[in-house]
Amino acid sequence: MNKRIITIIIVGLVLVGLAVFKLMSNKEKVEKNIYIHDADAAVLVETSSPSSHTFERSLNFLGTFEPIRQNTIGSDASGKIIQLTVEEGDRVGKGQVLAKVDDELLKLQLENAEVNIESQEKDDARYANLAKENAVSGVQLEKTKYGLRSAEIQRKQLQKQLRSTSITAPFSGVITKKMIDLGSVIGPGSPLVEITDISSLKLTVNVPERDVLKFKLNQSVEVRADLYGDRSFNGKVTNISVQADKAHNFKIQITVANAKQELMAGMYGSVSLISSQQKTALAIPRKALVGSSKQPQVYIVRNGKALLTSFNAGTSDGDFMEVIGGIKASDKIVTKGQVNLQHNANVKTVK
């Protein structure tokens, strides 16, 4: 009997050993087939150096479209949301009810105030008649009139609170964010929804000091959106900053009518301005740009590393962007392959 148990144990151990060996063998095969990215491997890129470029008479300044109005709607009332009529993406008109706060208690308080006023009015009339007959003092009549005025003021306060239980849209627009749900309990000042109005859009561009005087308030300018290519929209200069930033650029705001809502907030856009003469300046290919045109960046190759570098941009045309500062003519700018890059990555340039 003991020999049989020993035999079973030995056979079991052999089977376990074979299973472990098989698993280890399979693990080695799987690991050989798994691709592990080498973070230190050099990324193949194409580069070019900034060069002089002649910008034609039409100067372009880049920016991003922003809504003419965007506001987070809060509540003046407190209580539970018993009605919610909008969802994100809904279009709403000015004065439209967006949500309703439970107003049952306020209605009862207002009803009680009405009863109180009715009682005060009767007391006032009764004491006025008695005062004519010198049956009551003038002080008592005066107190009655003050009581009536106080009750009327209380009624007005309750009426205002009752009106505030209906949250309405202050202007027409689109619900771009919803912060509450049906049944939510809110207090005064609680944010409910965000409304965005894109019936008109604002395009803000940074203009170098040498070009700022080319813009005048109410000046008509030609605006383009990257999405629509060469198609232009009519814009009007509505604000010119009176103070430059550290790079000596001035913010110019152009308002663009958007009745058909073909343009959307967040799109890239540019404003064109006719110049009296051509201009030659240091420029880089626009395809080298990384990120947004409001905060332009490029990858510069130095000592085999790709360094993400910010620079000050000036005017631009379809293919080139003027460099005002931050990049030197001797720098090597990545023009192809930057989608695979990150700051300080190893790179290898195409020869």
Image: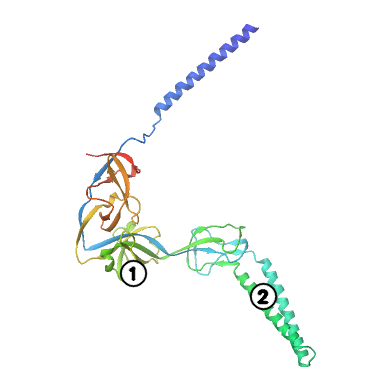
Q: Quadrant of the N terminus?
A: top right
Q: Is residue 29 above or below residue 164?
A: above
Q: CA distance from mark 1 to mark 2?
A: 50 Å
Instruction: Residue 24 in the image: state x and y as whole percent.
Output: 47, 22
x, y (%) of residue 157? 63, 73
Q: In terms of secondary structure, where does tag 1 sit?
A: strand
245 to the left or right of 163: left
Q: Quadrant of residue 314?
A: bottom left
- Residue at the disc numbered 1: 236
Q: Quadrant of residue 315?
A: bottom left
At horizontal 55% and vertical 64% (from top left) the residue drawn is: 74
**Residue appearing at x 62%, y 6% in the figure:** 3
Q: Is residue 93 left or right of residue 286?
A: right
Q: Is residue 25 left or right of residue 279?
A: right
The reply to whether the C-beta atoms of the residues labelled 1 and 2 are less than 8 Å apart is no
Vertical arrangement, residue 342 with respect to residue 283, above or below: above
Which residue has dot 2 on it? Answer: 154
The residue shown at (64%, 7%) is: 2
In depth, the one of 29 and 52 nearer the eye is 52
Q: Nearer the viewer, residue 74 or 234?
A: 74
Dot 1 amino acid type = Lys
Label 2 packing within 10 angstroms: few (<14), some (14-19), many (20+): some
Viewer-nearest of discs 1 and 2: 2
Spot occupied by residue 40 in the image (x, y as percentages of width and height):
34, 35
In the rendering, at what x and y percent does residue 111 appear? Answer: 70, 73
Using the image, determine if residue 346 lies above or below residue 217.
above
